[in-house]
Image (cartoon, rainbow, N blue to C red):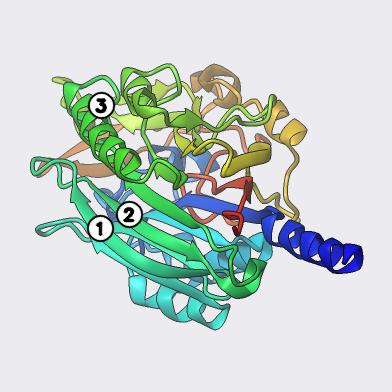
Amino acid sequence: LSFVCAGLCASVQQLDMPVNVKALHWNILGGKTLAASKFFGHAAPTLTGSASGISKNFVWGPQQHANDKPAMLDWEQRSKLMFQILSESKADILTFVEMENYEDFEAALGQQGYNGKYLKRPGSRTDGTALFWRENLFELMSSEDVLLSEKTGRVALLCRLKLKNESVGESGAHDLTLVGTHLHWDANTPQQIAEASFLKDHLSQEIAKSPKVPVLLGGDMNTEKGGPSFAELCKNDMQPMEVGDSVSWTNWIPETAYWTKQWGAETAGWAWKEPKKVIIDHFLMYPATGALSMTQPVTPVFRTPDGSIASEKDLSEMVPLTGNDALVPKEEQPDWKDSFKQGGSEAEAWLPLRKTETPEVGIPNKENPSDHLPIIAHLQLTPASSS
């Protein structure tokens, strides 16, 4: 009798063992359309010290060089690198925003054993939110499309996943609500706070209906942890997931030479904008009394020129040069000018030249195909015990 009891107890303990889950979130900078529509000021020809119009790593915005499409913005090149990074991540759960070309991801990730769901933003917008999960680990129980704002077309996608029985035993299945979203770009406006508040209220309803089901939210919140919209998201028992102590950014806008008329200035000319490094991509979770927990801090994935993954120490030590340190003094510049069409009129201006020996920093670049780094969270999902 004691032998039989011991066997039964061991079986139940096996069913109750937590399952390790790796989650990845990534703002992928769109696909064939969205990336080419963005203005990467740091990709100006000024950053190469030549008048070629194309930087080594970056792309000058299509407003200035509509016919210049270097390989960095070529979707086949970008997607090939993205799928390589995703494969190397070995993540079980993927959340994407600024997702275009969903069919490409569905096909490529399907070959790696993922199932997915996509929610396009309404109207003429070309991007949306996508969620993927390993089909041998989870199955989809239900999904919900949430419109956060008719004005901005911002959305959230919710998928109720069930841990498959074969992963933990017949009686050990547990649900997980997976959420992906992308809030309004400006953290200093009531619009972003309103979107965060709407999502918070919706998740509060979900938690009230199923308090034992954990929630994992991954998104580009376009705000740092100290922002009011981030605080709004945390009002419903959602907890921000810690990042490594030395991680200082997920989005890096390097030093930027920009044409002042581009931003509505009355006078035309070149100005220099200081670099900006921020953490605006986040994971938050509702742990449901221990059903979901972190096993280590959230980390970004940054690929170095040799293809390896940079460490947190490497990231923290990457300090971009300021404008004055990176520029060739005006008196030393060669006597050349370049013309740009701005608002239907042509203007000539001195282009500030960057020192050729200065390394180019910032993303996107040849090794990192988006203007955001993917972030990875290591989690444990505790199955519900059998009776």
Q: Where is residue 279 in the image (x, y as percent from the top left)?
A: 50, 30
Q: Where is residue 7 in the image (x, y as percent from the top left)?
A: 84, 67
Judged left or right of residue 112, residue 347 is left
Q: Which of the labelled discs sits on residue 239, or is there none?
A: none
Q: Looking at the image, which residue is at 44% across and 38% down?
A: 42
Q: Looking at the image, which residue is at 68% across and 53% down?
A: 18
Instruction: Determine if residue 102 is in view.
Output: yes
Q: Is residue 110 above or below residue 284?
A: below
Depth check, front residue: 121 or 329: 121
Secondary structure of the residue carrying tag 3 is: helix
Q: What residue type is labelled 3?
A: Thr
Tags 3 and 2 in contact by the CB under 8 Å rule? no
Depth check, front residue: 303 or 199: 199
Tags 2 and 1 in contact by the CB under 8 Å rule? yes
Q: Looking at the image, which residue is at 38% across and 59% down?
A: 160
Depth check, front residue: 294 or 49: 294
Q: Mark 1 points at which residue?
A: 144
Judged left or right of residue 279, residue 8 is right
Q: Earlier in the sequence, mark 2 or mark 1?
A: 1
Mark 1 surroundings: few (<14), some (14-19) or many (≥20) residues within 10 A: few
Mark toward the viewer: 3 or 1 = 1
Q: Position of residue 141 (x, y in %)?
A: 37, 67
Secondary structure of the residue carrying tag 2 is: strand
Q: Mark 2 points at which residue?
A: 158
Depth check, front residue: 295 or 350: 295
Quadrant (top left/top right/bottom left/bottom right) for the C terminus? bottom right
Q: Name the residue under label 3.
A: 260
Q: Which amino acid does label 1 sit on?
A: Glu
Instruction: Determine if residue 359 is in view.
Output: no
Image quadrant where residue 200 sits: top left
